[in-house]
């Protein structure tokens, strides 16, 4: 069985923070984006092992993310 999870990366002062959208408990940090990606994959693998050992059901993956643009200065202005 293959699950696909959605990673969210945020630039922070020490590098990058990575977190899974569908499984927020899977979170890590890295100095570079590539390091953060690798660490997030490792954290996901460890979480899957822990859930299996506890006979817990894995969260479903496959979230759909979409960016929404907004002109911030126009919000609240009347037409």
Image (spheres, rainbow, N blue to C red):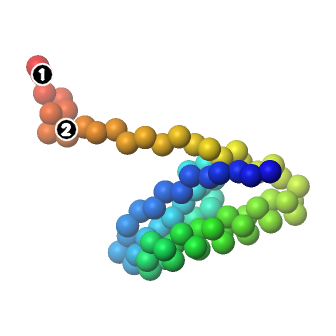
Q: Nearer the viewer, residue 61 or 23?
A: 61
List the residue tagged with mark 2. Answer: 71
**8 and 77: which one is in front?**
8
- Label 2 CA crowd tier, 10 Å (few <14, some 14–19, many 20+): few
Residue 70, percent across and down? 25, 37
Using residue 40 as the reference point, say whether residue 74 is left or right of it: left
For the residues labelled 1 and 2, the Cα–Cα distance comes to 14 Å
Image quarter for residue 28? bottom right
* Above/below status of 45 relative to 72: below
Task: Residue at 59%, 68% (x, y): give it.
Answer: 40
- Mark 1, Cα crowd under 10 Å, few <14 / some 14-19 / many 20+, is few
Q: Quadrant of the C terminus?
A: top left
Vertical placement of residue 58 versus 31, above or below: above
Q: Does residue 29 appear anywhere in the picture? A: no
Location of residue 53 with respect to 75 vertically, above or below = below
- Find residue 31 and report its image quarter: bottom left
Quick check: 67 above or below 27? above
* x 19%, y 32%: residue: 75
Task: Give the numbered dot on residue 44.
Answer: none
Number of numbered discs visible in the structure rendering: 2
Question: Where residue 41 appears, x then y in whole percent?
Answer: 63, 68
Give the camera-side residue of 35 and 59. Answer: 35
Give coordinates of residue 52: x percent, y percent. 85, 60
Residue 78 circle label:
1
Please indicate, yes or no, whether residue 8 appears anywhere in the rendered image: yes
């Amino acid at each position: 069985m293959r699950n696909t999870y959605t990673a969210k990366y945020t630039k922070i002062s020490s590098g990058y923070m990575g977190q899974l959208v569908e499984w927020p408990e899977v979170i890590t940090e890295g100095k570079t984006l590539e390091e953060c990606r690798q660490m997030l994959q490792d954290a996901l693998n460890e979480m899957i092992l822990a859930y299996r050992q506890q006979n817990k059901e894995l969260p479903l993956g496959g979230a759909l993310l979409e960016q929404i643009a907004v002109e911030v200065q126009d919000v609240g202005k009347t037409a």
